[in-house]
Image (tube, rainbow, N blue to C red):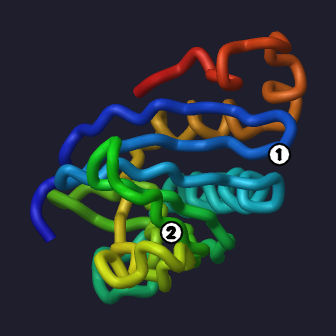
């Protein structure tokens, strides 16, 4: 419940799977959060509704309804503690909404805890963790632009690993 911390997020696109991957690191764990087409559309729609509510000053700092106010998406998350560890994976619910931090509203994606689906690693890491990603409006707009189908379809083919030339 503390303050918001800046983190770099690398963004990759995998055209064969039509998946955008957000790679980030928290508490010595590297996460790879995958967004399919329906998840990306849900993010873009949620952001549009958030902007409308923001402009109308219809955001409340009271209660917890804001954290999933704009719906959910099904995600896929891979995580690892070191480069030599097993890759763990799960299919968490991604809640789309907002949170207030330091009296300011942030668009947010809450990655919910989910069971580890990797049979070889279940003993050491039985569940993925809850992770909340906070976005300023400008950051959310930048990610929505990357999530847009027109943008993804016009990426140069043969890019190494489908890297999207944006890291923030």
Residue 143 sits in which quadrant? top right
Q: Residue at x 81, y 60 (%)?
A: 38
Q: Residues within 10 Å of mark 1 (few under 14, many from 20)?
A: few
**Position of residue 58 measured from the top left corner of the image (x, y, whole percent):** 49, 70
Question: Does residue 84 show up?
Answer: yes
Q: Residue at x 38, y 43 (%)?
A: 24
Q: Quadrant of the C terminus?
A: top left
Q: Residue at x 75, y 35 (%)?
A: 14
Question: Does residue 95 show up?
Answer: no
Toward the viewer: 104 or 27? 27
**Position of residue 43 measured from the top left corner of the image (x, y, whole percent):** 66, 56
Toward the viewer: 52 or 158? 158
Label 2: state its secondary structure: strand
Q: Find disc 1 in the rendering and name its residue.
A: 17
Q: Quadrant of the N terminus?
A: bottom left
Compared to residue 64, the image places residue 136 above or below, namely above
Q: Residue at x 61, y 64 (%)?
A: 76
Compared to residue 153, the image places residue 17 above or below, namely below
Residue 72 sits in which quadrant? bottom right
Q: Residues within 10 Å of mark 2 (few under 14, many from 20)?
A: many
**Position of residue 49 measured from the top left corner of the image (x, y, whole percent):** 65, 61
Q: Earlier in the sequence, mark 1 or mark 2?
A: 1
Toward the viewer: 120 or 73? 120
Q: Find disc 2 in the rendering and name its residue.
A: 97
Viewed as shown, does residue 107 lie left or right of 159? Answer: left
Viewed as shown, does residue 39 lie left or right of 125? Answer: right
Label 1: state its secondary structure: loop
**Position of residue 115 measured from the top left corner of the image (x, y, whole percent):** 49, 85
Q: CA distance from mark 1 to mark 2?
A: 26 Å
Q: Nearer the viewer, mark 1 or mark 2?
A: 1
């Amino acid at each position: 419940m503390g303050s918001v911390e800046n983190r770099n997020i690398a963004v990759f696109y995998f055209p064969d799977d039509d998946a955008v991957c957000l790679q980030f690191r928290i508490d010595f764990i590297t996460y790879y959060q995958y967004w399919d087409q329906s998840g990306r559309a849900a993010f873009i729609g949620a952001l549009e509704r958030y902007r409308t509510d923001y402009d109308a000053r219809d955001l409340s700092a009271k209660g917890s309804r804001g954290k999933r106010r704009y719906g959910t998406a099904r995600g896929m998350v891979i995580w690892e503690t070191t480069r030599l560890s097993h890759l763990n994976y799960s299919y968490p619910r991604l809640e789309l909404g907002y949170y207030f931090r330091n009296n300011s509203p942030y668009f947010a994606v809450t990655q919910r805890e989910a069971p580890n689906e990797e049979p070889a690693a279940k003993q050491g890491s039985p569940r993925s963790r809850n992770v909340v990603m906070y976005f300023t409006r400008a950051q959310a707009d930048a990610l929505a632009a990357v999530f847009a189908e027109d943008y993804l379809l016009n990426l140069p083919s043969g890019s190494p690993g489908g890297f999207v030339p944006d890291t923030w």
